[in-house]
Image (spheres, rainbow, N blue to C red):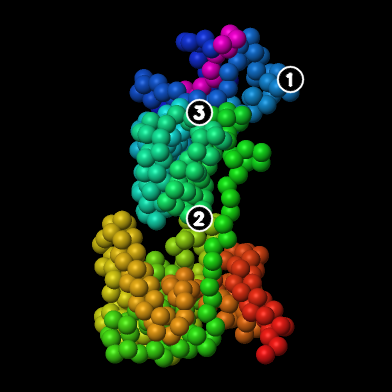
Amino acid sequence: MYRDSKDGITVLTILDTRRQKQRGLYPIKVQVIYKRIQKYYATGKELSVKDWDRLSETKAAELSKIRNSIKNSYDLVLKNVEELANRGDFTFDSLNVRLGKATGDTVNTAFKAKIDILRNEERIGTMMYYDNILKGVTAFAGEKIPFENITVEWLKRYEKFLLIDKNHTTVGMHMRAIRAIMNEAKKAGAIKETQYPFGKDKFEIQSVEAKKKALSLHQIGQIVSYRDGSETTDRYRDLWVFMYLCNGINTADLVKLKYKNIVDGEICFVRQKTERTTKTRKEIQAIITPEIQQIINKWGTPGKQPNDYIFPYIQGNETAEKRKLITKDVTKRTNKRMKIIGAALGIDGISTYTARHSYATVLKRSGANIAYISESLGHNDIKTTETYLASFEKEERQKNASYLTNFN
């Protein structure tokens, strides 16, 4: 019914009559032919020979719906074939990886394929996230989990299994990863719509509001002024202050800063977190205040050539995995030292995340324009910023409400 060719690779839809299903139906598949080798990818649809013969011309509502679904599966395979052909490195293995191997294999192999894709794209944080979820799924249900096993009941049992030693936030992370894999499986035709276990009146992932903390300007002043005579304390305190002053920059972006990112008295960078997920490359600009300059002068690398990293944590020749490990180590060391400072000052929950939260909230409480805060955080939508800030301001509202009955 559908057929295209690209650089010696043929993609077409077929009625696979090699093995008859129940009720006289046969599965409809997307066939890919390359160098006389044939591979088949499921669409999740089945028809009789009679209905298949009239599928391309029929106007019957039910068959039209099936035709549209088949076209979606076909377009998905064709798109990936064409992209690989354009790069000149088509193989069935690479096609299977791009499709997430979610076309009739197991949940485990779909996870592994997803991990391979993320590794190739150097999205190491997300790769590690999926790898961790795969370990949990495998520990619960084994090395070969068919897609059809992932039912509402299965998800409830897995949730109960996870809650033995994990919190609801972690459970939510596991479920969202499984949902993403199942979405790909559904899109590729490996499961039918009726087999999809997530959504209203099925399995709904509980959202857990993370506890977010923003410090007051007075508390930040205490941190800036804190001294205990330790050079290590000074280093990681200053690194935290740099994060706060540099628009709430996170560790992954901080370690990648080079001197060439300094332009006309500003530090200009693109958030790694959103660089791949937004169509428009959104550059963030942070004014180099005297405090930022002082931190760079004290802890920055001495060369100051354009391609030199500002802070001496990565060299630039590391693998993406190694760079991720270095970033995690810097975050861990900073958080450990800030916890010590917090204990000394009586301030709970200081972390690298707190620096970003505090940057945004201090600006808001000082009367800064929401549009400016949104732009400086690298958000693409002011509504995202408003929601982000609202999660911190509940604490402020609760504190203000307590004043109403502070009769003593």
Residue under numbered circle 1: 60
The spot of residue 331 in percent (x, y) is 36, 69
Q: Is residue 223 above or below residue 269?
A: below
- Identify which residue is drawn at 42% across, 51% down: 165
- Callout 1, which amino acid? Ala
How many C-alpha atoms fall within 10 Å of the one at disc 1: few (<14), some, or many (≥20)? few
- Callout 2, which amino acid? Thr
- Identify which residue is drawn at 64% across, 13% down: 51
Precedes in sequence: disc 1 or disc 2: 1
The spot of residue 192 in percent (x, y) is 58, 28
Precedes in sequence: disc 1 or disc 3: 1
Secondary structure, magenta segment, majority class: strand
* Secondary element at tag 2: helix
Start and end of the magenta stretch? 22-31
Residue under numbered circle 2: 169
Marks 1/2 in contact by CB < 8 Å: the verdict is no
Marks 1/3 in contact by CB < 8 Å: the verdict is no
Q: Nearer the viewer, mark 1 or mark 2?
A: 2
The stretch drawn in magenta includes residue 342: no
Q: Nearer the viewer, mark 1 or mark 3?
A: 3
Residue under numbered circle 3: 148
Is residue 332 toward the left or the right of residue 365 in the image? Answer: left
Q: Is residue 31 above or below residue 229?
A: above
Question: For the residues marked 3 and 2, what is the alpha-carbon distance in whole angstroms?
Answer: 26 Å
How many C-alpha atoms fall within 10 Å of the one at disc 3: few (<14), some, or many (≥20)? some
* Secondary element at tag 1: loop
